[in-house]
Amino acid sequence: MLNKVVLIGYLTGDVELKETASNIPYTYFTLAVNRAGNEDTTDFVSCVAWRGTAELMAKYLNKGSLIAIDGRLEVYRTEKDGSYETRTNVNVQNITFLPASKKEKEVEQPTQAPQDDNGGFTPHEETPVKKGMDIDFNDLKF
């Protein structure tokens, strides 16, 4: 039998580190993953990371970080008020921090200053170039 999940996506929120009653660190998070071949469709996958992985995530990652994870799929049933609910998430075993895309790495750079009659540059106020991502994570409701 094989139960293996590999995903690459963006964190939809800041990582919040929690602890169990026996002081084991963990974090629940949601990963926004575009479907292969269909960039217009995004799946939002619930994940949980434990111990050192959770601590590293809380220390180095935040909303919008691009990561790759692998782990196993967990499906479990809970009872609430006499009805059963099925939940599915990925139990993360490994995580890889991925570099931001070229578009995301753009740093604010000034536009070129206009030239004066002598071919030199005249001083002016720098105009920053906007940097951004394809997904505006502030619009996501969770």
Image (cartoon, rainbow, N blue to C red):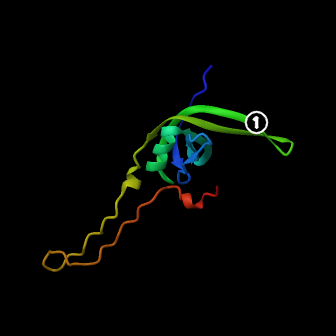
Residue 77 lies, in percent from the top left, at: 76, 36
Query: Total number of numbered labels?
Result: 1
Residue 37 lies, in percent from the top left, at: 55, 40
Q: Residue furthest front?
A: 22
Query: Is 19 on the left or on the right of 125, as rendered?
Result: right
Q: Residue furthest right?
A: 82
Mark 1 crowd level (few <14, some 14–19, many ≥20, 10 Å Cα) = few
Residue at 57% across / 28% down in the picture? 4
* Residue pointed to by mark 1: 77
Query: Is 128 on the left or on the right of 134, as rendered?
Result: left
Q: Quadrant of the N terminus?
A: top right
Q: Residue furthest bottom?
A: 117
Q: Quadrant of the C terminus?
A: bottom right
Residue 62 lies, in percent from the top left, at: 48, 53
The local secondary structure at tag 1 comes to strand
Residue at 57% across / 42% down in the picture? 23
Viewer-nearest residue: 89 or 38 = 89
Q: Is residue 36 visible?
A: no
Residue at 60% across / 22% down in the picture? 2
Above or below, 13 relative to 112: above
Viewer-nearest residue: 56 or 42 = 56
Query: Is 5 on the left or on the right of 57, as rendered?
Result: right
Q: Identify the image quadrant of residue 49.
A: top right
- The amino acid pointed to by label 1 is Arg
Q: Is residue 57 visible?
A: yes
